[in-house]
Amino acid sequence: MFKSTSKSLITLIIAVLIIGSLGYGALWASLAIGVRALSTEWVEAQRKAGWAIFMQEPRLNGFPRWPEVIIENLSVTAPLKNGGWTWVASPLTVTPSALDLTRVQIKASGQHRLTSPVLPTAPWVLNTVNTEMVLDVDTAGRLQRGDILFQDAEFLDPKGLPIVGADRLALSLGLSENNNADITMAFSGSGRDIRMAINAPPFARTIKAAQFEADLVGNIQPGRLQGAIEAWRTNGGALEVRRVFLDWPPLTIAGDGTLALDENLQPIAAFSTRITGFGETLTAMQQQGMLDRNQAASALMVLNLLSSNSSNSGRAEISLPLSVQDQRLSIGPFDMMTLPRLTWQ
């Protein structure tokens, strides 16, 4: 009797395992084929809209793990009305979310090359050790939210010279859920150890940490960048920054405010800020000949009178307005530096 029961139990377990394996295999195939079909349909829709997209036939991978779709030799060229730029990517790995084909994860590590009619012939290059994207789309394939993470990334100019690099850079954007109809998108981002090629004394070339959260007011229409940006500005476009944090030695700034463009399409900004490290900044400016000893001492005395101890760090902290006007950066009453002119193409 006992042997008979044991045999029946073993038979039942084997049957359950076989049925489970067949069910998982069917689910795996269904999801993988669905994502591949969705990718192909999306590409065809973009081609009909004037985008030139070339790639090898997507292939399935990953079984028995969660299914993946591999896209190799991808090249995307935008229509001229959208800038005419071309993006060439290393192989992409597309992984569907569990039982939800409107959310996918994309791994796009390696090299990315960008060329444009308004840029030199040689491509601009982005190299990353790890790049991960999570995209949420609606049933029509329109982007609703996107999150992207770069790790150990470096951006090179056409001569192969580094422009900016970062140990970690995370960005998010999506259609705003705010009830204010003027707000069209919400942005957030953070970065760590952002290395810049330009020298901007008295600041170091590496930003230790950065963070921002902002809402885009006004819609930027597709088309040539300069025309689109100018129309956006004319119609009252602005960037409402809910939070910004910048640890750029020797200065640390936290605050919020508004960023817009003037009639020459140059940044204008008004922020409320909380600043630490101003003493070290004045010392650095004096050492680099930007201020003489008397100017630095007078400025430090005034700032010390206005400062208080930060509840977070215990360092001296001061609340000051920060403004950008006519390409000049000012913090409180102090005219700090000239900002590079932006050229929109």
Image (cartoon, helix red, strand yellow):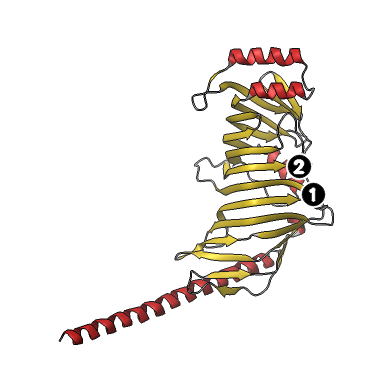
Q: Position of residue 336 (x, y in %)?
A: 73, 24
Q: Please, which residue is most extreme toward the left here?
A: 1
Among the two numbered marks 2 and 1 on one chain, the one whose residue lies closer to the N terminus: 1
SS for dot 1? loop
SS for dot 2? loop
Q: Determine whether label 2 and label 1 are within 8 Å by CB.
A: yes
Query: Which residue is tagged 1?
Result: 161
Most foreground residue, 64 or 261:
64
Would you say residue 237 is visible in this rendering? no
Query: Which residue is tagged 2?
Result: 197
Q: Toward which corner of the image does residue 42 lie, by quadrant?
A: bottom right
Q: Please, which residue is most extreme toward the front here?
A: 3
Q: Position of residue 105 (x, y in %)?
A: 54, 60
Q: Residues within 10 Å of mark 2 (few under 14, many from 20)?
A: few
The quadrant in which the N terminus is found is: bottom left
| Number of on-image labels | 2
Give me the residue at 62% from left, 52% from top.
150
Give me the residue at 71% from left, 54% from top.
126
Q: Is residue 321 left or right of residue 34?
A: right
Name the residue type under label 1.
Answer: Leu
Q: Position of residue 319 (x, y in %)?
A: 58, 21
